[in-house]
Every structure is written in C-alpha cells, then in structure tokens.
Amino acid sequence: MALAVPKANTTRSDTLRADILDIITTLQDQSTRFSLPQPPEALHHLRRKLEENTYNVLVVGEAKRGKSSFINALIGRDLLPTATHVATSQVFKVSHAERESYRIRFEDDSTQAISADDLVRFGSQVVADSGDAPSLSRIVRWIEVETPAAFLPPGVQLLDTPGLGTLYAGHAQITQRFVPLADAVIVVLDSSQPMTQPEVQLIEQLLGVTSAIMFIQTQIDLHGQADWRAIKERNEAILRDRFDGRLADTRVWPISSALLARAAITGDEDYEIASRHRELRAALESFLFTVAGYARPAEALLMCRQQVTTHAGTLAARLRSAQEASTREREQLHAEAAQRQEAFAAEWGPNGRQRSAFDAQLRRLIGISRAGFLQDLQPGGTISAPFERRIDVAQKVEDLNAIGETLDADLVAAAVQRWTAVCGHLQRETLAALAPLAGAVAALDVRDAPLPSDFDSNGWQPVPEELDLGQRLQALRMEVLGTSSMTNVGLVGLVLTGVIAAPVAAAASVIAAIWTLVRFWNKPEESQLATVRQQLRQHALETLGRIRRRFLEVDLDSSRYSLVDEFLGDFERQVVAQVNNITTQRLADAQAEVSRLVDVARMDAERRAAEAATLRVQVVELLETGKRIDAAMGELEAIRAAAVAG
C-alpha cells in the first residue's frame, strides 16, 4: 500500500502547460511582427523549463533522520539502502516508471546499468566501509532508480542525498553539489530534539535557491505523543522566528516511516492511521503539485502578462501619435520618448553615473568576497575554529584520536561549504546592486499610455501597476547572473574537492603514525595528553595551509590564477558583459521607438490614417493574447483549488 497521489489533474495540467507554451510562442511572434522588444531571457528560460517539465526535489537532512526510510515508505518497499549506521553515500535519483530500471550516471553523462541488489553495493557507506563496494574510476553524479512510485507527479524526481553532520565529511560535499539544482526541497527532521544550528544554516542556504521547502518530522513512533508534539511545535516556532515571510510554509509534518511501511506490508488501516499517512498524503500532494503544476506556470503567465502590458502601452503611444491631429502634440510624444532614452543613457550608458557606481560596487563585492574567504581560511577563522575548539576541550586521547581520523576530510568539507556560502552571498548582493537598473528599465518602458477612448478593448485592459519592480529584478537576475551561475558554484566546489582531496589525503600516513602510539595508552598523563593535543593542532594548521594554497595559490607553471580568482574573475566578466548587453539592447530599442514616432509625425494625413488602422489591428491582437493569459491563469487556479480540495 504505497502512498499514492491522485493524478486527476494531470491531464488538465498537461493541456494547460501546452497552452502556456503556445502563448509564449505567440508573444514572441507578435514582438517580431509588431517591431516590439523581444521578451526577456527569463521568459525564454521558463519556456525551456516548461518544455523539459522536470523538477528536482531534494531530500536533505542530518544523518540518521530517516530520509531513505521515508522514501522507501512512500514507494511501499525497502529499495534504498538503510541501516542504523550511516547508510547513503551517493545521491539516489528516484523517478516514477512503470518498469523498474537502475543505473549509475557519471559526470561525463555515461551510464552503467545495475540491478536492484547493486543499490546497496554502490550506494551504501556501510558496504564501502566493509571494503566490499566496487571501485569506480569515474566520478558518480547519482544512482538512478526508476520504479513504480505513484506518489510522484509526472516529471518530478526525488534526489535522496547523503546525511549531513556525519563523520563522513565527503557526504556533505556531495549534498552541496546538488543544492543549486533544487526546484524544491524536503527537509527531514527527527522527533528526538528540535532542529540544530547546522540545520538552520542549511535552510538559510536552501532559501538562496528556492522557497518551496517542506518539513517532515520522522520517527514519531519512537517517542510519546506529547514529546514529539512538543518537538514539532518547537521546530515550527524556530522556522517562524528565523524565516518569517521567506518560507512558503513553516508547518512541520509528523510521520512514522516504520508504521507506514508496516501498513504497506500488512494492509492494516490502523498502521496507516498511526503513521499519520493520511495527513502526509494531503500535504505531500499539495506540495508536489505546487512544485510541478503551479509555481513555474504561474511565473510564466505573470511574466507574459507583464510583457503584454508593456507592449500595449507602446502600441497605444504609437496609435496616439498616428491619430493626433496636432503636429505639436505628435512632436511632444516623440520628445517624451527621446527624454526617457537620454535619461537612461546618462545613467546607464558606458560612462553613466549609475553604471559607474554599479561597476565600483561589483568590484567591491568581489574584493570583499575574496578577502572574507581568505580570512575564513586563516588559523582561528570560520573554517578551523570549530575543530580547534574540539581539540582544546578533548580530555581523552581517544577523543583526540576520533577527531584526528577525520580531521583532513572535515576541514576540506568545511572549506568547500564555506566557499559555496561565499558565492551565494556574492550573487545575492550583486542582485541587490542591480535594483537601480531594474528601476531604470521600468522607467524606460512606455507602459502608462492609455488606449484611445473610442477603442473597444473587448473586456481586457492592461494594468500598469502589475509591473512589480521586484519581479522585474528577478527577471533581470536571469539575464545578468545567468541560469547556470549557481550550478557553476556547485561545480567549482566539486573541482576544488577533487583537487584538494588527493594531497590532503596523503597526510593520513603522518596522522596514523601519531595515533599508533597514543591509542594504546590507557591512562595518559596530563603532559602526554597535552603533547598529543599540540601535535593534532599543528597538523590541523598544516592541513589548513594546504587547503588555503589550493584555493588561493597562483600556478606559475601553467600561468593560471588561483581557482578562487579565476571563478571571481569569470563572475565579474559575465556580469559586466550581460549588463552591457542589456543596456545596449534597451538603448537600441528606445532609439528605434523614437525614430518610429518621428517617422509617424512626418507622415501625411492619409499615411497616418493607414498606420493607425494597422496599429488598431495589432492592439486588438495583443489584447486577445492578454485575454488568453487571464483564461490560463483562471484554469491554473481552478486546478490548484481542485488539488487542495482533493
């Protein structure tokens, strides 16, 4: 009895998605035929995403929270590896298919078919620790699991990630690679304690990618109802206090994966009720529908409506120019358009005041990012300080030994995680610095020109106030920062991990020599403990130095900047080039509009009348597109209401 999400709305959603794609095509065609600016890159990106119709839902959380058990319970069988020890060591991509198939996908996009029995062999840390896991010469992207999973809407795939906060530091690095790819996230908490500071930090990082986050609290069967309810309420309070207004939903959904799995095996309704399966089913259905069926179409439709509103204002201004009887008023119209163009050029042209300020701010942000990361990599900095404190407070050689056995990998993981956070902060600050450009682009558009009073709009009117500056800024983010910039941060982390890991791992033999001597001391004297602590601290500083050099050292042999400087340099060049492209194109569009108004003003009465007739036909066609957009919005809301009611 696997959890199944009703698919009653699937056909309606597919039909609506096809209609939205056709609306975007129509809008692009009208932009070309009516000599209007083309839709922004953000809309082209949304079109590609709608065509792909795939959605990545990450399942993340600390180790031993029951992520894989939760997914197995949803599927209705024990498929993904689970254990009382840390289990998952790779990412499992779970998607719905009528026939089962399993494969390893490597970073070069090649694949290797495996069986269901191989999932534990290739994806479990337990097996890897035993030495029985097969060795792979290529980097694994993920392990693909295609199986009947009725709870997944079409196109939705779960990415089950390794647990965070474990003694396997490489697990955190694997998970960090996939955070930028998330369309939505399921965060798995447990019922033994409220969420920890690392979990809060993880949510902060996730919010840089998506606000579609669902919270699951597992293992309620291991605790009394009063206890797990208190933890649930505390978790919800933390989410409200720390992330008020930034999360789509701060509710936490309790679940017993063990009881849900037992219900699947026995068919006993009592187990289903005790597992909280029914509440979860409704919540998960709503969440996955929002991810796959609502958010992306709604964003595309809103952007299309904004585009129609802007274009309607431009055509209305042209129509007024063609219909004005007074030469003076016609000249006034093109003078106003010329003034908008000149104001934009003065602020955002090659030597514009705002452009110079933005370039300086960008250089400042990049400099701060580099300096801050260098500071993080210093002894006592953000990366090493937690490990230094652990070493200082350890009171037993066994404790120092446990720290030392994973110290190198832990430091590498902390450095990569910190670098990812620095890059995310840089992008957010760059986006904030682009706000004046978004405002200038909005001011440049002719969006408030009314349609002539005798014009029959046939029930649809553009609404200029819908052109929200924040939404324009998000569209501008796509144009300037690109669709893959966050992904690139993750890939840089992967490259850095590979480059750093090999030389750092070589230090294992040095550490082993120390621990061989100390781990057999039953009652070390204080002086011996101090000696071991000092040796471990010194080794931590040496490892940190090697990491620092790998990130920031120039390679003279290959005449290359450091990895960090290369990334930051590429980032600056990308942003500057895209801002140049946007400002140049916007100025060209504005100049073309001024020239068109001048040409119309110079026409004789007969030609202007013909031009006005053509423009009226164009406006009617554009308003029909607006009506189609509103109808699609209505259908989308109806589908959403049906999903919630279901």
Image (tube, rainbow, N blue to C red):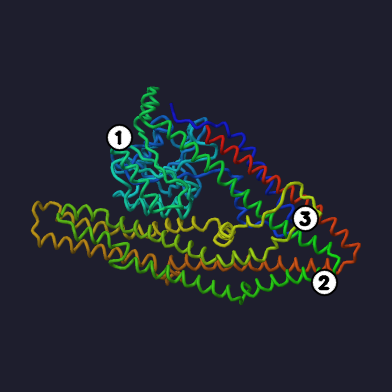
Label whose residue precedes the other's in the sequence (3 or 1): 3
Q: Nearer the viewer, mark 3 or mark 1?
A: 1
Does the CB distance between marks 2 and 3 fall below 8 Å?
no
Residue 156 against residue 432 in the figure, above or below? above
Residue located beneath label 3 in the image: 33
Q: Would you say residue 578 is visible in this rendering? A: no
Name the residue located 58 percent from the left edge and 60 percent from the top edge: 469
Provide the secondary structure element on which disc 1 rests.
helix
Distance (Cα) linking label 2 and label 1: 79 Å
Label whose residue precedes the other's in the sequence (2 or 3): 3
Residue 18 vs residue 576: left or right?
Answer: right
Does the CB distance between marks 2 and 1 fall below 8 Å?
no
Label 3, residues with CA under 10 Å away: few <14, some 14-19, many ≥20: few
Q: Nearer the viewer, mark 2 or mark 3?
A: 2
Provide the secondary structure element on which disc 3 rests.
helix
Residue 613 vs residue 551: left or right?
Answer: right
Residue located beneath label 2 in the image: 328
Seen from the viewer's position, the closer of residues 132 and 317 is 317
Residue 82 against residue 323 in the figure, above or below? above
Q: x, y (%) of residue 140? A: 43, 47
Q: x, y (%) of residue 623? A: 74, 50
| Amino acid type, label 1 | Gln
Label 2, residues with CA under 10 Å away: few <14, some 14-19, many ≥20: few
Label whose residue precedes the other's in the sequence (2 or 1): 1
- Dot label at residue 6: none
Residue 345 vs residue 363: left or right?
Answer: right
Residue located beneath label 1 in the image: 225
